[in-house]
Amino acid sequence: MNPAMSFLDSIFVNLKLWTLNLIGHFLPGWAVILASIVISGVVILCLGPVIMMYLTLLERKVVGRMQNRYGPNRVGPWGLLQPIADGIKMFTKEDIVPTNADKVIHLLAPIVIVVPALMVFLVVPFGRDMTAADLSIGVLYFIAVSSVTTLPIFMGSWASRNKYSMIGGMRTAAQMISYEVPMTLAVVPVIMMSQSLSTASIVNAQEGLRWFVFTPWGLAGFVIFFICTVAECNRPPFDLPEAESELVAGFHTEYSGMKFALFYMAEYMNAFTLSAIAVTLFLGGWQGPFLPSWVWFFTKTFALIFAMIWFRATFPRFRVDQLMGIAWKLLLPLTLVNMLVAGLWYFIPGITGWVGAAVILAVSFLGLTALNKPVIPEKRVYLLEN
Amino acid sequence: MSETILNEPQTLEINFGPQHPSTHGVFRMRAVLDGETIRGLKLVIGYLHRNHEQIAENLTYPGVFAYTDRLDYLNSMQNNFGYALAAEKLAGITVPERAEYIRVIMAELARIVNHLLLVGFLLNDLGAFFTPCLYAVRERERILDIFEDVSGSRMMCNYFRFGGVKNDLTENQLGEIRKVVSRLPAFLDEFEALLSKNEILCMRCQNVGGLPKDLAVNAGITGPMLRASGINYDIRKTDRYSIYDRFDFKVPLGQKGDVYDRYYVRILEMRESVKIVEQAIAGIPRGEFLNAKTLPLLRNPRLFKPAAGEAYGRIESPKGELGYYLVSDGTPQPWRYHVRAPSLINLTVLEEMCVGQKIADAIVILGSIDIVLGETDR
Amino acid sequence: MDILNFGIKVGIYALMAGTLVLAVGVVTLRNLFHSALCLAATLIGTAALYLVFHAEFLAAVQILLYVGAVVTVIIFAIMLTEHIAERSVAQRNRQSLPALLGILVLIAVTGRILLKTPWAVNPATVGARVTVADLGAALMGTYVFPFELVSVILIAALIGAVIVAKKEKSS
Amino acid sequence: MTRPQIAKEKNPVFGTGILQGMWVTMKNFIDSYFKKADQGGIFTIQYPEELCRISENSRNFPFLVYDAAPDSPRCTACGICERECPTKCIHVEMAKDTAGKPLRKPAVFEIDYGLCMNCGMCEDVCPFDSIFMDRVYEIAGRDRTKDMLIGKDALLKPNAYFQKIRPKDAADIDARRKAAEAKKAAAARPATPPDAGGTAS
């Protein structure tokens, strides 16, 4: 790696070190440690909302293009100021609280929901040495924190005293609990192979182009994990908790103004962090040739986010029983098979293990879809009469 | 919906509408749920009642045309057609050859517009984020441009007149129609690639909201909904009104009568409509576009006084049998004017189709019936 | 460094106090839903305490299982039970006084035991951390029998749940 | 039985339909950058900068035509349009001179655009080729009763305007009117003295 590259590669790390050194000249040691935490924290706290703002713009633009229209292009060049205009609009909207609502919890829910969304940023390795906190239990931490997201959704749906919200809340709980199981199990082969729970060392285990996604179990695991992440952050085709056509807006039906914006912020930040985790676990994180590490990381993450937006532009929504069926009857058995396949791949090196693993996965996928009778589209015949 | 269901401890009554994103207007459903499953469902209609029939009885016969546009506002050409047929039958007016061809072209274009929108919004009800809908609107836009070019208005066409149509079609316009229609098969192929085999759509639509044959017949269901249930009944074929007997087209029939069949029958009907329009453009004769004898009557509507009597004119509108019943007492105003609205009658089986399904299905089933509240409530 | 250490200590005590207050809330709040939320917060506070004491794995598992699963199920039950969340539930009955006495005795006894016991410290383990790898090795090595036993019990529970669900459907 | 039929086969592998659908949206995404509107590109119109093509037949709200000057319109205040208007949105009052004699031109001619439903009935029934359907649509107002009630002065537009928006119809009508006038003049010349013709219009 040439010097210019390595300078670019570690530009943010060096920037932070330089700032800390500067502070070290004036302040005692404990303040430097504190400053180190504060700098990382502030960067993450700013990164989250900014990413969310521009994700909304990106989403609207991409969906617009897929639907043969422009998307927002009025505020600023290419509509770049649109998120700011939206933000101002959200701030100035009237804040409506239903009469019978549980006022305190109604207020707390949108605030609480942002917390786990922001907390996941802590373990995301944005680049070489760019993890805010390289916890030894990184992956487990991420799974644990994202499982908390259910609670604020419950709070919001219950406190609104609205039947649509209630049904939306129920759906969320069922969906999140169900999809957490295959999601966790899909990560297991990665942990088995990298022999660590720390996100940084998982990325290090995928040195060069040995990304896990290039192995049969990695590909299967990635697809399952990605489907589960889409379900976890309630994005189409799994957006049942806020299914517009049935439940108006699901659990945030009764929210307006900034509270509503906070729900959206959490949703988009979740979309970002979950994509980032998927990149870390399967797509080699910041690993990649030629470009600086953080460029690779953001490219891959935005590619996954683009895929999420693409799903949104293409698919109708599942029904609630089908959603559960897919999690329990299709994804869960596949992850179990995938764990065994990963072991096989590990103990039989070379082409034999590779092909064997791929064949087992393909056969089990075909078998499972064939066994899941209600999932398969039927053959239909249409008569053309005179 | 019996009250006993309401009193069961596990049920939850929920109100869809009148303000709800997917009730297609101001329509209300009271659904009783057990978990997510629908146990009972009751329609509450009439929020958009505009006194259509009474207004018409206070107007002259030609003056009613503008109001028929507003019945099924996505589909005004067909509404005009039905009313024109009824009034012509009542007054014994003949229609010139060329006008008949123009009428058929416009009616079939309107059918395509209607089915395109239906499929688009059905997919919105299924939860697709406007993509199929906007593709449909993209093609509909070209047809609406033709409507504007020909009649003066995109949606409220008010194009038909007793004994013909308002304006003639120029060669240019015919060429334009040919161009638009020739695009449609390719577009429908793209549309189908996006939808017809999509597993999610199939899962959501197949075996959902099935309508058995006997129930469909007994409830007076007509249109694509009836044909999706497998009954070959198309008024274009049975009545052969206007000049439909001259065109070669088929009536697609479904077998199960579920939402998927209703969706797919409509796709096939659009393909048949394209064929009809192509044949009509090829065969359109020269001649007058309006019966010259009725022109003075239209210039002075009070002279239009059909002899006392009654007439019923019906057409195969995209939604079903659209019938107009007129009673004249010899004055310039209809003594009785009644519309047999397919949207309303097809809606009556909603509860039978929904009970036992999930909430999400109820929305989709409602979407697949294809109602327009302007016509349902009148 | 003193100020930092002091700050950390204050933080830990504040965390403990907060957790305790929330725990009291669980039993005293009259609204069941609020109680359940307090329970969740208490469990998260406990997890934070584990984190402070470098038991990261335990903290993550605490949140994952208790907050993510158990409390969710509790709230699910509350929301499914008709109107129970809107009613305030009586907090006292005739047994409350004897129960209080019993608890006071229990606290006294455990406190005495805690204070009297000489807590032996093995110098080898000071500063050592139990990693996830160690835990895994222990579970799959030394304690493999109880581990498998637990999984068998869980499978039995799972099958039982399926059967219960099925029966309700057919009736 | 060999009745014509169309069969929708099952997908060979679960998921192919999903991938096919994703390909369609991706194709449209790419096309939106490289193709023109009628070949699958972006089809929306950027409204204030671009305007929709308006065809000659297009109609929305009625206006009145005058030939020479606004105070001598074609309208004779006969009230047929008022009577035949389905929504009764037209209000006409005939002008009277100081003696109270009707003048065959409107003193008040109001159309409530808020009520009008653009049917074109008034245009159909007008015997004096006076009222026609306009195509101006940027007429939003803040007050439904005041801004939407259009008076005579705003309604009156010169024949040149009509010729501009609907050249074909205007040409027909002008020819017809000219022919009728010529005929009338030819009929009138031998019978009445030349000064009698002026008061009629």
Image (cartoon, coloured by chain):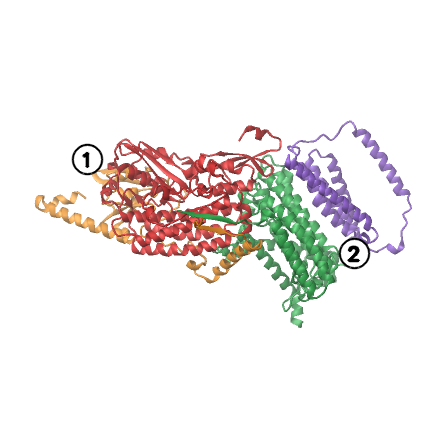
Chain colours: A green, B red, C purple, D orange
Relative to B265, C84 lies left or right = right
**Looking at the picture, does residue D48 appear above or below residue A324?**
below
- Which of C140/A176 is in front? C140
Q: Position of residue D168 (x, y in %)?
A: 26, 53
Where is mark 2, residue-wise? C133
The kind of secondary structure element at disc 1 is loop
Relative to B373, C147 lies left or right = right
Q: Chain of mark 1?
A: D
Q: CA distance from mark 1 to mark 2?
A: 112 Å
Residue furthest to the left in view is D190
Q: Residues within 10 Å of mark 2 (few under 14, many from 20)?
A: few
Where is mark 1, residue-wise? D99
Q: Position of residue B89 (x, y in %)?
A: 29, 38
- Which of A350/B20 is in front? A350
The answer to whether residue D148 of the structure is visible from this angle is no
User: How many tags in the picture?
Assistant: 2
Residue furthest to the front in view is D1
Q: Quadrant of the N terminus of chain A?
A: bottom right
The kind of secondary structure element at disc 2 is helix
Amino acid type, label 2:
Ala
**Looking at the picture, does residue D195 appear above or below residue C90?**
below
Write down the quadrant of residue A243 in the picture: top right
- Which of D96/B370 is in front? B370
Residue furthest to the bottom in view is A2
Q: Residues within 10 Å of mark 1 (few under 14, many from 20)?
A: few
Q: Nearer the viewer, mark 1 or mark 2?
A: 2
* Residue pictured at 36% horizontal, 38% vertical: B323
Amino acid type, label 1:
Ala
**Looking at the picture, does residue B220 appear above or below residue C11?**
above
